[in-house]
Amino acid sequence: MKILLVLGHPDPGSFNHAVAAAARAALEEGGHDVVFHDLCTEGFDPLLPAAEIAATAALPEPIRRHCEDLRSADGIVIVHPNWWGQPPAILKGWVDRVVRPGVAYRFEEGDSGEGVPVGLLKAKAAVVFNTSNTIEDRERAVFGDPLEALWRRCIFDLCGVRDFHRRTFRVVVTSTLDQRRAWLEEAKMICRRVFRAGE
């Protein structure tokens, strides 16, 4: 399987980078073809110019390549921290520029203006790994877990990816080395379970 792995974190020494590396290792050990984009290292430009908004827009080569990687992926893994209940700006910009009409979804013609989407992604499953410094009870009670709604309902469900898995590792700032090692093994296990070779 071709798996698209996208990382959105600026610090190469971050636990997010370790999670992405663990996921990549598990996927490659499983025989998958991993296409890895470390957005910050690549210097991905998150700003969506007006000229790119239309579904028929001519895209710059880097964006066209990202779109093709997304379109052709059999599975998707996203890794990012929870910053203010959202992905970092660089990853939100990747969504704006790459998860675009004609690539990830389209709208039915003559749908009376309701904007009912038809998902176009080939991917059968998606995994999102997050890090957080907020305990789970507070995240749900006070904030309503906005990342769950964003990734599951607003993005992947809309684009036709129904097999969705999300794991948040918390609380990172007070975690021990042993906890982090266990989390990395869990990330590997999730990738092996969700993306089984030959399925």
Image (cartoon, helix red, strand yellow):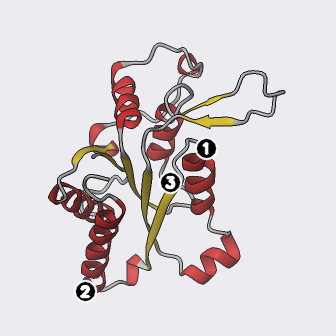
Q: CA distance from mark 3 to mark 2?
A: 26 Å
State the residue at coordinates (67%, 69%).
144
Q: 113 or 58, which is in the foreground?
A: 113
Tag 2: residue type?
Asp
State the residue at coordinates (44%, 80%).
171
What residue does disc 3 label?
87
State the residue at coordinates (54%, 53%).
162
Mark earlier in primary sequence (1, 3): 3
| Marks 2, 1: nearer the viewer | 1
Mark earlier in primary sequence (2, 1): 1
Q: CA distance from mark 2 to mark 1?
A: 38 Å
Q: 123 or 170, which is in the foreground?
A: 123
Look at the numbered discs 2 and 1 and tell me whether their residues touch, using CB distance below 8 Å.
no
Which SS class for mark 3? loop
Q: Quadrant of residue 74?
A: top left
Q: Is residue 136 left or right of residue 192?
A: right
Tag 3: residue type?
Pro
Q: Quick one: label 2, few (<14), some, or many (20+) residues within 10 Å?
A: few
Q: Quadrant of residue 110?
A: top right
State the residue at coordinates (44%, 54%).
126
What residue does disc 1 label?
158
Mark earlier in primary sequence (3, 2): 3
From the viewer's perspective, is residue 103 above or below residue 23?
A: above
Q: Quadrant of residue 188?
A: bottom left
Which SS class for mark 2? helix
Q: CA distance from mark 1 to mark 3?
A: 18 Å
From the viewer's perspective, is residue 173 above or below residue 110?
A: below
Look at the numbered discs 1 and 3 and tell me whether their residues touch, using CB distance below 8 Å.
no
- Percent x, y of residue 117: 66, 36
- Percent x, y of residue 131: 42, 68
What residue does disc 2 label?
178
Q: Is residue 193 left or right of residue 86?
A: left
